[in-house]
Every structure is written in structure tokens, then in C-alpha cells.
Image (cartoon, rainbow, N blue to C red):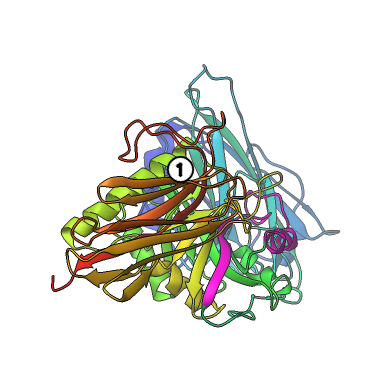
Amino acid sequence: MCLDGHCDHQVDILRRDAERSGEPGNGPGRRGLLAAGVAGAAALTLAPMTFAHSAEAAESTTGTTGTTGSTGNAGNAGTTQVISGHLATGVADFVHLPVEVPSGVRKISVSYSYDKPAVPSGTPGNFCDIGIFDERGAGLGGRGFRGWSGGARTSFEISNSEATPGYLPGKVHRGTWHIVLGPYQVAPQGLNYRVEVGLTYGEPGPAAPRDFPPQRAKGRGRAWYRGDCHLHTVHSDGKRLPAEVAAGAREAGLDFMVSTDHNTSSAHAVWGDCAGSDLLIITGEEVTTRNGHWLALGLPPGEWIDWRYRNRDDAFPRFARQVRRGGGLVVPAHMYCAYVASQWKFGFDDADATEVWTGPWTYDDEHAVSTWDQKIGEAVRSGGRWVPAMGNSDAHSAPQVIGLPHNVVLADDLRTDSVMDGIRAGRSWIAESAAVELTFTVSGDARQAGIGERLDAPADAPVDVRLDVKGVPNGTVRFITDEGQMHQESLGAEGAGTVVWRTTTSLAAYVRAEVRHPMANGSAGQGNTMGDALMFGPMAALTNPVFLKPSGR
């Protein structure tokens, strides 16, 4: 591996230099190249990039030198350094490039590039993300987080007055900053990279405004509220501006939405202008690890959650606790997504809910619903905690539809904490659009329970399961228990109807409802009501279960 003109045989020398010359509070030593962990996924630390030690010194710097060069002049009072190198396949998950930032810096600018050599069909090619941490530290969960753009951008800037979307504005203090590369795919030929860092000197300028959204909108008291909890903007890899996402949420008939840009909290401070009495905007993050993605919903505005770990690192529970301490929810996302690093590997012990339907209905969602239903059965058998289902659009750009699907949540009011409470309790169902309406109740022994609740009744007393639905022409209603599908009934062309089925608490430990569209060929599915060889069309609505328990048990 060649780094800054140094070759493999110098790695041991650099490591010894780092051990001798490390500076407290400034990260690795000046010539360090360390292979180490960040209390999570393995990280590789390269030799530091060193700039002039003050704005005055920078004004006299001219010219360029070798692979690692510096440029500058008195006219713009800035300097630039370039580092290039090679990463072999199998390199650590994250590569840290320390940057020694002197005093008097107004703005830091970073650009990067890497090669994409041809690879055989079926072989992963080069993909490399980027972000940055400031002098406060780059360790796992470190306070120094200043932004991440993944692979969505090739450059970014940070100053006190503004920052590139995905990055946090603020003063550029003296100390060791760390540019972090994330080579999540490396071709067999390896990955050649080039990083250019520019410093602009001068007074820091005024602080950027922060306009966090309010925690409450005008609600209807205890009611059912609609919201999409997985949305992206230009602050990560989305193409929509925050204002465009908010407009899309309103157009979809939503009462609330959650901002979940990948691995950054930078959008939090701009949502205030987009919120209103008619739309509650909740701050969150999509935490994009190497072993699956998860949603941190309801984060305190400005809070950031680290993603730099794998299942084997045993760090996920730590960050799940951080989310819950702030009143938020931990939600595995698109657990069967086929993209690299997207399949969920962390289990469900630390999940508050799980996303089983993401965007337009696909086989991945079918598989996710099946897994979720299995987990409900396990919880019933063990007496353990069950995990509610969610559905979200994961919309990034047009033509992806905001609100397809979304959650309909029973909450005490249109407030962040109330919505989180409703989702956590499973008092919710999933709709493909605001055109779909339903109510789902279970009644028996002069009692009634709704979605996410429990009905206690004598073991052999009749229990009536009732679904009222609108908005699914020629749809199919399914009632599913711990024994599988127990009832199926078709809706007419008008898409509205009431379906009632009778059971007992001795026969069903829970019951949930699905409403499906017809198959593409117009059929509503073949097979009997016990679930033999059934085939169904796309989901239109899906409820969380109502639990049934014999009285006295």
C-alpha cells in the first residue's frame, strides 16, 4: 500500500513514530498510520496532513510539492493539500485521514475522487463514501461529528456561517480533524483515491441560523394521525429539498413526517420553516451500518447517531439505548433489501418496531411481513415482547411517492412524544395512501379491543373480529392468526365493505388484518380459506394485531 509516497516497508516505522509522538487531544501522531478499531468497525488511520501553523504563515506559502502538495497566496489567504493512495481489497471499513488544522481558519473545503476499474460481471466495483470529524474526536459516537455525505457528493465545505448539505456549520477550530473514507466496496484491483483539502483563513463570520421544527402541531386530540417515517432530502442521497418533501407530505394527506437522512443530522436545523400547524415534522436519522439500516425516529433535534459498526462489534445496543434515552424509537428498515450492506443482521431484541413495507409492494415486503408474523408467534409462545410493524416510503426523489405507504397512528395528540408512544405500543396500521380507510376491532364478553390492544374473554366465549374498510376496489380482506389465514372475503367494485369473522380466545392468540389488491390478471387469489396455495396481489393495508387471551390465564 502506498500512502503519501510512503510504501509498505515504511508502515512499521510510521507506527512507531505515532506511538512516540502522539499528542493528547489531537489523535494520532504526525506520521502515524495505525490499523485500529473505533470501538466498532475496524478503522485504518493514515499519515496526517499538516498545514501552515497560522494564517500569517499561510500567506507566504506558495508552490506545490510531490503527491502531497500545498498551494496558497496572499490574495486569498488559503492553502491546499492533496493526498493520494491505494486501498487493497479487504481494507478496514473506515479509513481515517488526520488533518492538522492550524488556528485562524475560517473554512475547510474537501473534495475527493477514486477510480472505478472494470470488473467481471457479478463482481463488486469500487464505491467509497466520505465524511468528517472535527478536533473533538472521531471515536465511535464521538462528539466531533461534522457531517457525512456517503457517496452522494464529491466535495463539501464547512464554515461557521454555512455548510454543504449533510454537514454541520460551525467554527473551524485548531486541532486534528479526521476525514473519514468509507470504502464499502473495493474491486479486486483495489481502490486508488485522491483527497484534496483546502483551508481558507480569516474571521469565522456569523453563526448559521438553526431552525428546528416544533414538537407539536395542531391536532384533534386523541385521534388517528397519518405519517411517513422514512424520507430523504438533499442532506443525504435524496434529490428533493426539505421544502419539497414537506410539500409532498401535505399533498399525500399526511399529518406528520420524519426526516431520516443517512448518517447525518444536518437537515434537522432547517425543518422549522417547513413545519406548520397542519404538519408535524419529526427529526430522525437512517443509520446505515454495514449489516443493515435502521431508523432512529424522534431524535432530539440536532442529535446524531453513529453507524460505524457491524453486528459482530456488539455496538448496536449502545446506540439503541441512546435513541431511547431521548424518547425515540429504533426501527430496522427494509430488512430484505438486496443492496450491499442493507440486509438486517442485528436481530430484534433492541427494536421498538420494524419496517415491513417499504415503497411500492415487492417480494421483499412479502418476506418481511412473513418474518414479522413469525416473530409475533414467538412472542406469544414465550410471553415476551412483540414488535409492531411499520410501513414507509423511503422516498428519495421523483417519481418515488411520499406516503406510499404510511402509518396511521392512534396518538393522544399531534405531538412528537404522542406519535412515538402510539407507534411503540403498536396502535397503528399501514395504508398505501390516504384513500384507504379502515377500522379493526375485536369484541367479546361485553368488551372491545382495538389495534395493538388485548381482549380478555372466557376461552369458549364467542369473539367477533370486524373490519370496516374503504378505498380498495375489488380488494381481498384476510384475517390471520397464529394458525395462519383463517378467513378471506372479497370487496366489491366500490372498494368498501364490512367483514366479520367469529373465533374464541382458545382458538386464536392474536388476529391481524390485511387488505390486498386483486392480482394483475384480475383474480383475487386461488385456494381455500385455510391458506392452501394462496396467491394475492399487492398490499393496500395491513394492521398490527389485536391479542386474545382466555380470562384468568
Q: Picture coordinates of residue 50 (x, y %)?
A: 59, 54
Query: On the rendered structure, is 466 left or right of 245?
Result: left
Outermost left residue: 553
What's under tag 1, amino acid-wise? Asp
| SS of the residue under disc 1 | helix
Residue for badge 1:
365
Relative to 254, does residue 114 appear above or below in the rendering? above
- Circle 1 crowding by C-alpha within 10 Å: few under 14, some 14–19, many from 20: many
Residues in magenta, as a range: 223-252
- The residue nearer to you, when weighing 166 against 300, is 300
Q: Picture coordinates of residue 115 (x, y %)?
A: 61, 30
The answer to which image quadrant residue 354 occupies is bottom left
Q: Picture coordinates of residue 253 (x, y %)?
A: 67, 63
Q: How many marks?
A: 1
Q: Picture coordinates of residue 228 (x, y %)?
A: 57, 60
Residue positioned 31% across, 57% down in the render: 502
Query: On the rendered structure, is 168 left or right of 385?
Result: right
The answer to which image quadrant residue 350 occupies is bottom left
Outermost top residue: 120
> Where is the C terminus found, in terms of image quarters?
bottom left
- The residue nearer to you, when weighing 280 against 311, is 280
- The residue nearer to you, when weighing 478 against 301, is 478
Q: Magenta includes 216?
A: no
Residue 39 seen in this snapshot? no
Residue 466 seen in this snapshot? yes
Q: Magenta includes 251?
A: yes
